[in-house]
Image (cartoon, helix red, strand yellow):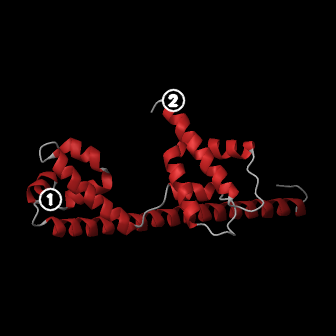
Amino acid sequence: MNVTQLKSEQQGFYQRLMCLASLVPGFQLSQSLIALYDSSLKSMGYARLCFAIDEIIQNRSSRDPFPSLKEIRGRANPQLSHEDQAALIASQIIGAIRSIGPYRLSDAKEKLGSLAWQVVQSEGGWENLCTSLDDENLPTLRAQWRNLAKALLTQKQGMDQELLCDSTQKKNQQGASLVSLQSIFLDLKKHEQTMGGEM
């Protein structure tokens, strides 16, 4: 992207911020606030930010305040449901089969990513998928791969939550051990004081 195009996209972002500010009664958009929003959000890309602000403008009510940085980030980078992610993975596999073919295994693995590759492996491997896909069974295989990807996403989420719980439990146990050591130390101090320092 050249500097002129970047400046143009940045100007579009500024214009949308000003347009949005004009829709919020009593709100004044200062240069320093524009600079704050720009510096905080520009890493997401101005095209995505412009899309997010356009969406906010289209869906806002007259009582909505000026959006926070978090709200704009959320619109610019929405989280997909497991169903949507699974459908995307199935489509990526089909696209890779058609564009890469059965003999460039490493290219396919690199293009698809780890979760899609797990789907490939559990379906008999890359070459098997490539040779089994045709126009007749495309809908069936797409649904099968989507369901498998969804199951893997759900399993991964469960494992992530389990790891988080284990980590929290270990921290709590360490905290309890520390409290126990502190109470033992305090008991020893009290005993030492009652014995007149003879220990």
Q: Is residue 180 above or below residue 197?
A: below
Q: Residue at x 14, y 59 (%)?
A: 124
Label 2 packing within 10 angstroms: few (<14), some (14-19), many (20+): few
The mark found on residue 177 in the picture is none
Residue that sits furthest to the right in the current view: 196
Q: Is residue 154 left or right of residue 178?
A: left
Q: Residue at x 76, y 57 (%)?
A: 27
Residue 154 visible, this angle: no
Question: Which picture quadrant has residue 159?
Answer: bottom left
Circles 2 and 1, Cβ within 8 Å, touching? The answer is: no
In this view, the residue in front, 67 or 185, is 67
Residue position marked by numbered label 2 in the rendering: 3
Q: Is residue 20 left or right of residue 170?
A: right
| Amino acid type, label 1 | Gly
Residue 13 visible, this angle: yes
> How many marks overall?
2
| Element on which disc 2 rests | helix
Residue 6 coordinates in the image, percent (x, y) = 52, 35
Residue 45 coordinates in the image, percent (x, y) = 51, 44
Q: CA distance from mark 2 to mark 1?
A: 48 Å
Question: Which picture quadrant has residue 74?
Answer: bottom right
Q: Earlier in the sequence, mark 2 or mark 1?
A: 2
Residue position marked by numbered label 1 in the rendering: 124
| Amino acid type, label 2 | Val
